[in-house]
Image (cartoon, grey):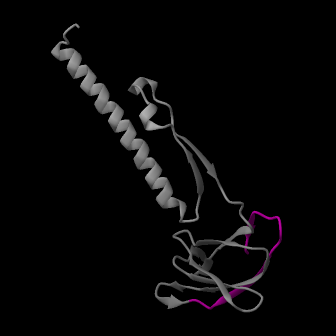
Amino acid sequence: MAEKTGLDVLTELVDEIKLLNKKIDLLDQNVKILLNKDKGKVITTVQAIDPSKIQAPKEQGKMIIKKEYPKRVGAMAGGKIIATVDKIQVQIYEADVRIFDEKNIVVKETSTNKSGVWQCLLKPGKYVAEIKGKYRGKYLPVQNKSFVVPDGVDKLEVM
């Protein structure tokens, strides 16, 4: 039996540490995927090799992640809120937008971003967008926009 040099022992220890780190990373990824699975955003299927069958770091298999996105029903509806003040058009930031359905029930609430844009995902149907905003501390007149989200449309701009 040949004796190992200190360098050989050190190399084996480094390889074992690398192997353990990869096993820990694999377990950590699987735990994160399982914890995020209940959030409903992405359905994730995890397939991984058995860590006990890994011989050396160079021979490791890869974890396979297959993401299945749920089919989106409806359209991304949105619009841009612009006010004309002193003959200049300005985007209205943080305007409140409430979306009502045919039964006059609020189905979505959102607000405009810095560019005056709002958007939300809506199922096919008839809606009214109620828009309330301020400019320089003064309330603007409330606007109501009726629109229809047709079936089979992915994106809809509400004018």
Outermost residue on the front side: it is 1
Could you tell me if residue 93 is visible in this image?
Answer: yes
Give the image quarter of residue 76.
Answer: bottom right
Instruction: Work out which quarter of the rendered image holds the C terminus and state it.
Output: bottom right
Task: Identify which residue is drawn at 62% across, 76% down.
Answer: 82
Q: Position of residue 27 (x, y in %)?
A: 42, 46
Q: Magenta residues? A: 140-159
Please tell me whether residue 144 belongs to the stretch shown in magenta: yes
Please tell me whether residue 114 belongs to the stretch shown in magenta: no
Q: Position of residue 14 (x, y in %)?
A: 26, 26
Tell whether 12 sits left or right of 134.
left
Tell whether 43 sits left or right of 129.
left
Question: Residue 28 or 79: which is nearer the viewer?
Answer: 28
Give the image quarter of residue 127.
Answer: bottom right
Task: Identify which residue is drawn at 83% across, 71% down.
Answer: 150
Give the image quarter of residue 111.
Answer: bottom right
